[in-house]
Image (tube, helix red, strand yellow):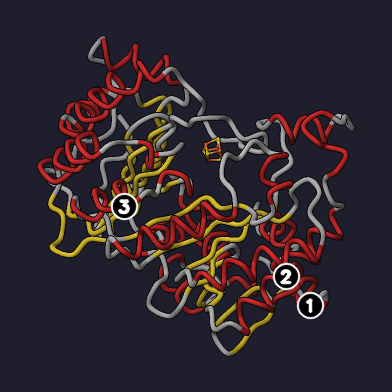
């Protein structure tokens, strides 16, 4: 058994993974898929079981059982497309969470949904079961771009979704947008952003298209192929310009840029996602769900069939578990802290990690400051606007 230290817990976040989608988007690198609908109910039963029997399943995986109870103030239904769940399925799942954990009185409860999920009926049922934040995978407001990556909605569907959500009393709406989709141009990206701004979301997540082996589009781009409209993807320079334009436009529109990809109206920052960047514990359930208790990280299997099989046999779905070494905790603190626009406090690094960054990484600090990627203001070290575009290079520089 690993390190038995008991971490001091702040109110945690609970994450529930629903890896089911109606169709697999070509750019998607998550462990979600258009799985057979017949698997959904069995999956949800096992997910409920995993939530209700968390202590046993963690113990079985070798995770020290230092907790009798978990206090949480956020619940996040992600995936995948949890917006596909009907009212009964959602109610059962949230009941399981409320019975297994101490959920504070006014939790933030987020559901990820595609615009076509947010019908009048679905929106009303989300509000009825306590959901108070909707994260909508819009990605673009241009039909050709949406079709090119396999999205099933249109700009009209997005507008209808906003109105259905508002009618149901759901005002806290976040919109995801991707910079780098096939056929995207500076003008079309700006049009998407403006069309969404006109609908009045409280929050934006702007992601740069990830080009990696884990998505069909990513693989095709890496192989210089043309399937999945890979040859119509804008260049890296163009994508960087789109992202910079988004920063500018969203700032002008009064959004607070609080994390590399995230912009919010004041007071609408995602409480749940901030836990990921500030070292607050979170506990994930379901396929590919990750957990962190302040000292240890663990992750469930990313295969739906393995998850179902393990749960069927009464085995823990946890596939990987490790206790962080002090050096890893320090690096995570730097890396996650710099993702946030507020940056990191050098004196806090000194107090918590007995580390003087200027001493151990003086050369990198100097180089990155000279390049205009990092800035120091009194005690705070943060990425500049330009540094956001080179964040991976900066993070790599602080790894030992
Ligand atoms: S991007 Fe979202 S909707 Fe599309 S396949 Fe991935 S998880 Fe499903």
Q: CA distance from mark 1 to mark 3?
A: 45 Å
Q: Height in image: 326 above or below 90?
A: below
Residue identifier under label 1 = 372
Q: CA distance from mark 2 to mark 3?
A: 39 Å
- Picture coordinates of residue 390 (x, y %)? 75, 62
Q: Counting other residues with Cα less than 10 Å from the Cα at mark 1, is it few (<14), some (14-19), or many (20 or more)?
A: some
Q: Nearer the viewer, residue 368 or 43?
A: 43
Query: Which image quarter has ligand 1?
Result: top right
- Picture coordinates of residue 67 (x, y %)? 16, 44
Contact (CB < 8 A) between labels 1 and 2? yes
Which mark sits nearer the N-terminus, 1 or 2? 1
Which mark sits nearer the N-terminus, 1 or 3? 3
In the figure, is residue 282 to the left or right of 365? left
Q: CA distance from mark 1 to mark 2?
A: 7 Å
| Element class at badge 3 | helix
Q: Nearer the viewer, residue 314 or 305?
A: 305
Label 1 CB less than 8 angstroms from ligand 1: no
- Picture coordinates of residue 96 (x, y %)? 15, 38
Q: Counting other residues with Cα less than 10 Å from the Cα at mark 2, is it few (<14), some (14-19), or many (20 or more)?
A: many
The structure residue drawn at horizontal position 26% and vertical position 47%, both measured from the top left corner, is 5
Q: Nearer the viewer, residue 88 or 254?
A: 88
Which mark sits nearer the N-terminus, 2 or 3? 3
2 vs 3, front mark = 3
Residue identifier under label 3 = 123
| Element class at badge 2 | helix
In the figure, is residue 313 to the left or right of 359? left
Residue identifier under label 2 = 387
| Element class at badge 1 | loop
């Amino acid at each position: 058994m690993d390190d038995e230290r008991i971490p001091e817990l702040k109110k945690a976040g609970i994450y529930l993974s629903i890896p089911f989608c109606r169709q697999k988007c070509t750019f998607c690198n998550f462990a979600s898929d258009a799985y057979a609908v017949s698997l959904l109910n069995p999956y949800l039963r096992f997910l409920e079981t995993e939530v209700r029997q968390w202590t046993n399943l963690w113990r079985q995986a070798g995770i020290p059982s230092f907790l009798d109870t978990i206090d949480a103030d956020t619940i996040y239904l992600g995936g995948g497309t949890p917006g596909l769940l009907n009212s009964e399925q959602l109610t059962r799942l949230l009941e399981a969470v409320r019975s297994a954990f101490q959920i504070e009185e006014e939790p933030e409860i987020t559901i990820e949904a595609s615009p076509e999920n947010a019908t009048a009926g679905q929106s009303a049922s989300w509000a009825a079961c306590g959901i108070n934040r909707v994260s909508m995978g819009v990605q673009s407001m241009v039909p050709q771009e949406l079709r090119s990556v396999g999205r099933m909605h249109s700009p009209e569907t997005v507008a209808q979704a906003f109105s259905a959500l508002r009618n149901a009393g759901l005002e806290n709406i976040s919109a995801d947008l991707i910079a780098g989709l096939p056929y995207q141009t500076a003008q079309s990206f700006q049009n998407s952003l403006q069309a969404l701004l006109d609908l009045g979301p409280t929050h934006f997540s702007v992601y740069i298209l990830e080009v990696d082996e884990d998505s069909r589009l990513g693989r095709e781009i890496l192989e210089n192929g043309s399937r999945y409209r890979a040859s119509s993807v804008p260049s890296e320079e163009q994508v960087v310009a789109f992202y910079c334009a988004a920063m500018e436009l969203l700032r002008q529109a009064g959004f607070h840029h609080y994390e590399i990809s995230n912009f919010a109206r004041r007071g609408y920052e995602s409480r749940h996602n901030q836990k990921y960047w500030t070292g607050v514990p979170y506990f994930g359930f379901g396929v590919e769900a990750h957990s962190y208790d302040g000292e240890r990280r663990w992750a469930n299997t990313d295969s739906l069939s393995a998850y179902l099989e393990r749960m069927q046999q009464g085995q823990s779905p946890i596939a990987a578990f490790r206790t962080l070494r002090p050096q890893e905790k320090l690096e995570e603190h730097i890396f996650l802290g710099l993702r946030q626009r507020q940056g990191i406090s050098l004196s806090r690094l000194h107090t918590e990690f007995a580390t003087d960054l200027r001493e151990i990484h003086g050369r990198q600090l100097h180089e990155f400051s000279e390049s205009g990627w990092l800035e120091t203001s009194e005690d705070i070290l943060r990425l500049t606007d330009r540094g956001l575009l080179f964040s991976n290079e900066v993070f790599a520089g602080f790894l030992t």
